[in-house]
Image (cartoon, grey):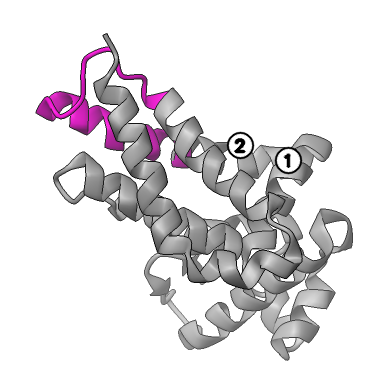
Amino acid sequence: MTFDVHGGAERTGRGRPRNPAIEIKIMEAALRLYGQVGWQGFNLDGVARGANVSKDALYRRWKSRESLLDATLRQRFDWIITIDTGNIRDDLLALAKRTFEVFAGTYGEVALQLRSDARRFPEVHAFAAPYREMMVLQGRRIVRRALDRGELPGKAKPGLILDMLIGGIINHIVSTPEKLRDNMLANSDSFVTTIVEIILQGIQNIS
């Protein structure tokens, strides 16, 4: 019996189908634990305790911490694939808002831990690199679609645009002092709108 992280439980020739609710519960616990302790402290026993499920229930689904975290990331963070509003401004706003939510929200520490651990641990890099490449590719496709529609000048660089947008948002979140965090969160819509407008205005000035 296998589990399709995008479509729920799959039935094999015998036995009962797995309960998708348990899969989700385990994945949520995996994200919480990984965000708290990073790769060095991440293990299946800790996930089982956090999800309040038996070790057998977890080990029947995933045989290693690598396979669990890989499946969890792919299920929870493939949102960028769905961004395609038909115009670059709205696409970048959707990307900026979701990026802000991810890095400033409950699982922001997961994304930050992953960036660090992928450089330090080969086993993390092995499953994180394809995931990161997929995210980068989808982000650049947003810009390339705008180029194809003629919304941006031909000299616009997809990689540079994404670096300015994503990098600016992450830097804003991680560099904001804790005492100003509530204010930062309250003004997130204004911030992401402003950074998108600045980037688009700058691109149009490319000669």
- On residue 29, which mark appears? none
Q: Position of residue 5 (x, y in %)?
A: 47, 65
Residue type highlighted by circle 1: Ala
Frontmost residue, 16 versus 67: 67
Question: Of callouts 1 and 2, which one flags the residue occurring earlier in the amino acid sequence?
Answer: 1
Residue at the image point whose x is 47% and y is 62% from the top? 188
Q: Please state if 102 lies on the left or on the right of 82 as rendered.
A: right
What is the secondary structure assignment of the residue under circle 1? helix
- Taken as a whole, is the magenta stretch helix, strand or loop? helix
Dot 1 and dot 2 residues touching (CB under 8 Å): yes
Q: Is residue 142 left or right of residue 170?
A: left
Percent position of residue 38, x then y: 80, 58
Q: Is residue 62 magenta?
A: no
Say if 14 sits above or below 4 in the image: below
Q: CA distance from mark 1 to mark 2?
A: 8 Å
Q: Quadrant of the C terminus?
A: top left
On the image, the x and y values in percent for residue 93 come to 32, 51
Q: Which residue is mark 1?
A: 118
Q: Write the residue at 45% across / 39% down.
A: 165
Instruction: Identify the residue under disc 2.
Output: 129
Query: Which of the 4 quarters of the picture holds residue 140?
Result: top left
Residue 80 horizontal side relative to residue 68, left or right: left
Q: Is residue 140 within the magenta segment?
A: yes
Per the image, label 2 sits on a secondary structure element best described as helix
Is residue 60 or residue 36 the one in the foreground?
Answer: 36
**In the rendered structure, which segment of residues is drawn in magenta?**
135-159
